[in-house]
Image: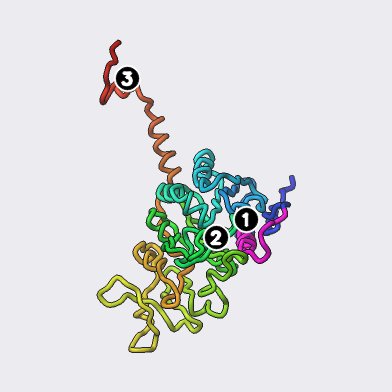
Amino acid sequence: MTATPTVQLSPKDFASDQEVRWCPGCGDYAILRAMQKTLADLQVRPDETVFVSGIGCAARFPYYMATYGFHTIHGRAPAFATGLKLANPDLDVWVITGDGDGLSIGGNHMLHVLRRNVDLQIVLFNNEIYGLTKGQYSPTSKRGTRSPSTPQGSIELPVSPCAVALGASARFVARGIDTQQPHLVEVLKRAYAHHGASFVEIFQNCVVFNDGAHASFADKAVAGERQLAVEHGRPLLFGKDRSRGLRLKPGRLELEVVTVGESGVTEDDVLVHDETNRALATLLVELQPPEFPVAVGVLYCDPVTSYEEDLSGQMKDAGARPATEAELEEMLRGGRTWTVDG
């Protein structure tokens, strides 16, 4: 009897036969490549993998993956994905969304899927604009953004996707950048390995309607000084020579940038990243250039049992001892009841 050899899947095996239709130069191409490499590295089964999306440029994603997929309705991808995962917990379910789809019309669904801790990988493409509908400002657009819907500049403060996720009690929160492939692939692998809801924000460039939105920290010329790649158990150092770091201001729950070797500062004074520390993650997501670097990588990871695990356990407990007729009668007639005459 001859054993069937195991087929080693490559990124090409996760690419569908559909023509990829995004604008030339769009950051979505890089994210697609990173996802296909991630799944190939993990050697997941395409027939057990599902991509679910809502509406927007990012929502084309399921068409381009040689897996199962659902292109659903605006903002409701988390609800569809929750139903899929509860119906078949063995599926690997990814939710693909954007800053508008996930944080505006879909904000309530994002809130609840995160607090419920459904075992999904949620990937939010953040280009700080509505690209599909031709450049209106989005919930993450910077104050002052001029667009067809804000011709004099947005007067609203932007939403921080990772801050929203942390506020919704997400147990895994991470960031990546579209053009930084090796780092992004590792972040996606960590999201996949996490049991429960994983939230990954990807800074993605829209070359047509918001080109350079992340240039202040994503461009190669400034990346070394404007990015902080966090790693659990490692000091929060950054800069081309890793001579700058973060520490708490004396007597205050506030971060400051220090330079190792100046004013008596040593590496021991620099904070060490603890991805299980929600308070630290909350401080890190708020850092903005030019005063601070932008933190990327796994900002927070502290797993607990997932929603479908708890639900399955509850159903088993309920089925272990079926209710008696007397208990059902008591339940139906208990509490506030009344009789309608006539």
Near mark 2 (Cα within 10 A), the count class, few <14, some 14-19 or many ≥20, is few
- The front one of 51 and 218 is 218
Q: Nearer the viewer, residue 294 or 265?
A: 294
Is disc 2 placed on a helix, strand or loop?
loop
Give the label, 2 or 1, closer to the camera: 2
Q: Which residue, given by chain and number where applicable, does mark 1 sit on?
A: 43
* Tag in front: 3 or 1: 3
Which residue position holds label 3? 329
Residue at image location 54% in from the left, 41% down from the top: 84
Chain part drawn in magenta: 19-35
- Mark 2 and mark 3: Cα distance apart in space: 61 Å
Q: Secondary structure at mark 1?
A: loop
Q: Can see residue 300?
A: no
Does residue 23 belong to the magenta stretch? yes
> Three-letter amino acid code at disc 2?
Pro
Task: Check whether the beta carbons of the residues at disc 3 and disc 1 lie within 8 A of each other.
Answer: no
Height in image: 21 above or below 68? below
**Which mark sits nearer the N-terminus, 3 or 1?**
1
Numbered mark located on residue 238 in the image:
none
Q: Nearer the viewer, residue 205 or 40?
A: 205
Q: Residues within 10 Å of mark 1 (few under 14, many from 20)?
A: some
Mark 1 belongs to which amino acid?
Gln
Where residue 169 appears, as percent x and y from the top left, is 38, 54
- The CA span between labels 3 and 1 is 52 Å
Residue type at tag 3: Glu
User: Count of labels shown?
Assistant: 3
Residue 279 visible here? yes
Indicate the position of residue 183 as horizontal and vertical percent values: 55, 68
> Circle 3 sits in a helix, a strand or a loop, which is it?
helix
Label 2 vs 3, first from the N-terminus: 2
